[in-house]
Image (spheres, rainbow, N blue to C red):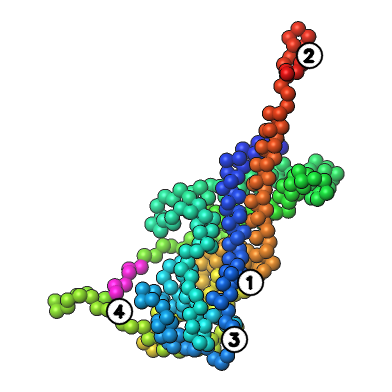
Amino acid sequence: MKKFFAKVHLWLSIPFGIIIAIVCLTGAILVFETEIQELCYPSRYFVKEAKGEPLSPAVLMEVARGQLPDSVKINGIRVTSDPRRTYQLILPGKKAACFINPYTGKVTGIDDGNGFFMKMMRLHRWLLDEYKRDGSFAWGKVIVGYSTLVLVLIIISGLAIWYPRNKKVLKNRLKIKTRAGWFRFLYDLHVAGGFYAALLLLVLSLTGLTWSFGWYRDAFYTVFGVGMPSQQTHAAASSSPHKTSGERGPKKPPRTDYTQWGKVLADLQSRYPEYKSIAIQDGSATVSTAGYGNTRGSDRYSFDPATGKITESQLYDDLPRSAQIRGWIYSVHAGTWGGMTTRILSCLVSLLGAVFALTGYYFWIKKKLGKLNRPSCKTDRTTGRKKGLG
């Protein structure tokens, strides 16, 4: 039976190993995206001196407008509870933001969301292919999905191969020898290290598959006893009322009253003395408080833009399980659910996933070259003995 699993392990690893190494390596890099960004651009994220009270959102918006090009549109503001950190002005685009000193109003940097880490994310999820918002076929997403599915089979077959016959073999397969040469070290790292990393690497693979296949996501939700939320179609609100015979063109949307944002911020800060961050956009606000568990869990509010009065709330605790589990899947996959400890473990395991793929190629090539370098033999038909050629 082990021979069968060995063949499965080998012949799945050869064609998919490179893709698996890329996905694991980029995943390890993305775990500490925030810390790396803060290390490279400290002035973006931290203020030199925290003096007095932060300026109101209205003042910050006005001051920022004078420093930014007219083409830059500001969609909202994200406020942090840490007095040492800058605020973020939310810009159009995924992860795009403008950083501003909350005490002076000085813009300290702009991230257009298309830098190194966005490329790492695209490589991790789509092999640099474009994301298809309409749900059409994307070869990068499909290749990453099937490679992740293959990784699950490789891990399971690897555990079947690793399973020892007796206690003596078990003792050797749990050790990583560091003084027996590079080959032995890499072999032990592949075998023993693979065993230690198997469970968490399997968890990362199984959660990652929910972004690749709809059928898998449905099955995953079913296993946890929750149903997929029904797709609700919302009619897009028109930016202007219907034209009448006397109108020449669409009306411009009313200008946002940022002074009301200050009222919303003060209201939410009084409700959440220990909030992590508060994001305010036109008519809505989101409060993040979680440091552990589902780190994407947040409470959402709607408010009247004209008065700043909160009109509706959607608390995380009141959400259906299907909505809560989506955040849990991300938190487990990114390693954020247990704080810095689980993030470090997720990063190390992801790095080891890449190492396992590359060392697997190394052993396979070395074995092939070893066979090629052996002197070939022929059998003498008269004597039945083997004789070397050359």
Going by the numbered disc 2, the residue's amino acid type is Arg
Q: CA distance from mark 1 to mark 4?
A: 40 Å
Q: CA distance from mark 3 to mark 4?
A: 38 Å
Question: Is 32 one of the magenta-colored residues?
Answer: no
Q: Which residue is mark 2?
A: 385
Q: Above or below — where is 162 with respect to 131?
A: above
Going by the numbered disc 4, the residue's amino acid type is Pro
Q: Nearer the viewer, mark 1 or mark 4?
A: 4
On-image quarter of the C terminus: top right
Residue 333, given in percent of the width and then of the height, sits at 59, 61
Q: Which residue is mark 4?
A: 253
Q: Residue at x 58, y 90 (%)?
A: 51
Q: Above or below — where is 334 with respect to 370?
A: below
Q: CA distance from mark 1 to mark 3?
A: 29 Å
Residue contact at pointers 1 and 3, CB within 8 angstroms: no
Q: Residue at x 80, y 45 (%)?
A: 181
Q: Earlier in the sequence, mark 2 or mark 1?
A: 1
Q: Earlier in the sequence, mark 1 or mark 3?
A: 3
Inspect this view and state whether residue 310 appears.
no
Q: Secondary structure at mark 4?
A: loop
Dot label at residue 49? 3
Q: Earlier in the sequence, mark 3 or mark 2?
A: 3
Going by the numbered disc 1, the residue's amino acid type is Tyr
First to last magenta residue range:
234-239
Q: Residue furthest right?
A: 168
Q: Residue furthest left?
A: 245
Dot label at residue 292? 1
Dot label at residue 50? none
Inspect this view and state whether residue 234 appears.
yes
Residue 101, given in percent of the width and then of the height, sits at 52, 83
